[in-house]
Structures are given as C-alpha cells and as structure tokens.
Image: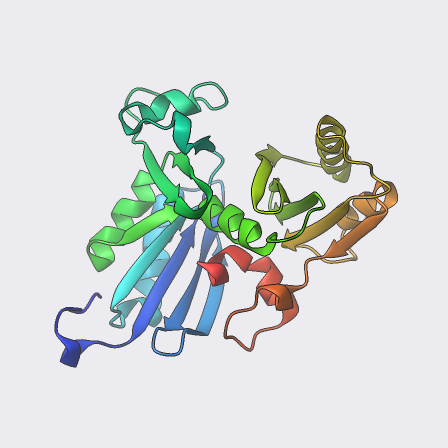
Amino acid sequence: MLVNAANITEKKYKKLTLLVSENGLSYCITDTLNNQILQFDAVGFDTAHSAKEQLNDVLQSRSVFSEAYDEVGVLHQNNLCTFVPDALFDEQHLGAYLQYNNKVFAHDVFCSDALANYSMHQVYVPQSAQLAVIEERFGPVTFKHAHSVLVGRLLDLSKNVDDKRMFVHLAQGHFEMVIVQNQHLLLYNSFDIKTPEDLAYYILFSAEQLNMNPEVFKLEFLGKVSEDDAFFKIAYKYIRNVRLFDPEDARINNDFSAQDNREHFILFQS
C-alpha cells in the first residue's frame, strides 16, 4: 500500500523495491531517512507456469506487501533492451533501436531510462503483465530497467580507472557483460548460456573484439556466483586476472554479507 507522501504526518520513510523477471522476484525494503536496507528476500518462479500468476500469489500471500510505503519502485529484468547515445536518441522511435538485436512486435510497449551523467538512454520493453499486477496491488509505481542500474553503477565505479575492466553479472540461464574504461561504456550485452563453455566463448570473443589481452585485463564477477562455481572456474582457466567483485567498493548502508551484496547488486544499488 502506498501512503500519501504529500502529508508528512503519514510518511513511513520506507521504500519497497521489486526486481521482476520471468524466473522470479526479489525485493528489498529501504529506510529512506538513513538510506539503509532493512531487509530483502528472493522468490523463484516455476518457469512451467505463468510468471504473472506466481507474482500475484507472492504479493497476496506475504505480509510484507500489505505494509505501507512512501514509494514502490520496480526494476524490469530481461534482455529486450539496448543502450543508445543521446546524439542518436529519438523518443518518437524507441522500437527502432531494438528491432536489430531483439524480436519485437508492433503491439509492444517501449520505454527508456536516461543515464544523464553518461549522455545515453537505455531503451527497453517493460514486463507489462507483471507491472499491471504490481500496480493493481500498490497503485502507481516508478520503474526502470535493471540494467540501467547495473551499467550506471559500474560506470560510476570506473572513474579515474584507465584500464579496460570487464564485469560479468551471472544469473540463471544468462549473464550480462559490461566493459568500461574511465566512465566510458565500451560494451554491454546479454547472453543466454547453458554451459560454462558458453560463458568462456563469449568472454574470450568479446575480449578479442576490444583488443583485451586475457593475460592482462581484469574480469570481475557479480550476481549469483562463487569461486566454487563451474562458471567461475572456467573463466579462471582462460583469464589470468579473475576475481569476485568486492562489494566494499560500492556497499551502501547494509549489514548483509559480501555474497548477498554481489548476488543482489542491482537491487541494492537501485
């Protein structure tokens, strides 16, 4: 439930952020006075059943979604997105930017997020069915694409770092690759994968295209990953400088573990 933020006596100083995908839902509650994350959780969906129906069931069954919040934010996570430099951006033709690397339809809804500090926009197809369920529960919400948060934050962290840095954000069945150099985005892409070999192929191919020497460049993993994972191990086999991303570089006010901060990096940084 959303409270009337215009009336200060009704303010709860709490924000609910939901990250939705076809595979599940994760959420966190933030104390907006202290900018501190109070709690978070994640719920996986059965891909054999409707994500919309499962999302509705979760929102109806958990008491946390019956509490009052000053703001509810939604992060869409899918690969129906692309980044466009402001010099080429035209809000009247959003679908045109996606048609060359995604399968889009005339009835699709297109949205964009401005990354004002980096003179570009993220253009994407929101998950309209899930968004409708959330708005039915909470009323109007703010939303953006999850990868706008991911790329924007990694660009922030690349300030004054002249070396090319590759980040891999690993999730179930896919990963996002972001390559940055001193607050310039050199590459962003999302890849579907089934095996560790798939991951290694995309990493090495992308590095070759940008003349990044596997003996030299640094590769950092975020998302759902550990040093014991086969995906991490195969990267370590071919890339000399591989590590898990150190969340202390970007930690906001929370007391959760380093692994939690890596796995829920996008949610926590939103």
Foreground residue among 199 and 244: 244
User: Which one is in front, 184 or 269?
Assistant: 184
Whether residue 135 is visible, yes or no, is yes
Question: How has the structure been colored for display?
Answer: rainbow
Q: Residue furthest bottom?
A: 9
The count of marks equals 0
Q: Nearer the viewer, residue 185 or 196?
A: 185
Tell me if 45 is positioned left or right of 199 in this view: left
- Name which quarter of the figure residue 90 lies in: top left
Q: Is residue 130 above or below residue 93?
A: below
Horizontal side, residue 105 vs residue 254: left or right: left
Quadrant of the drawing holding the N terminus: bottom left
Residue drawn at x 40%, y 25% is 88
Q: Position of residue 161 (x, y in %)?
A: 67, 51
Q: Residue 239: percent from the left, percent from the top?
A: 83, 43
Indicate the position of residue 195 as horizontal and vertical percent values. 73, 37
Farthest residue to the left: give it. Answer: 7
**Residue for point 57% across, 74% down:** 256
Q: Is residue 224 above or below residue 16?
A: above
Tell me what residue is drawn at x 37 percent, y 34 percent.
125
22 or 117, nearer to the observer? 117
Does any portion of residue 104 appear in the rendered image? no
For residue 241, side relative to residue 40 (left or right): right
**Residue at 57% over, 46% down:** 183
State which quadrant residue 91 falls in.
top left
What quarter of the picture does the C terminus occupy?
A: bottom left
Q: Please provide percent x and percent y for residue 204.
A: 77, 33
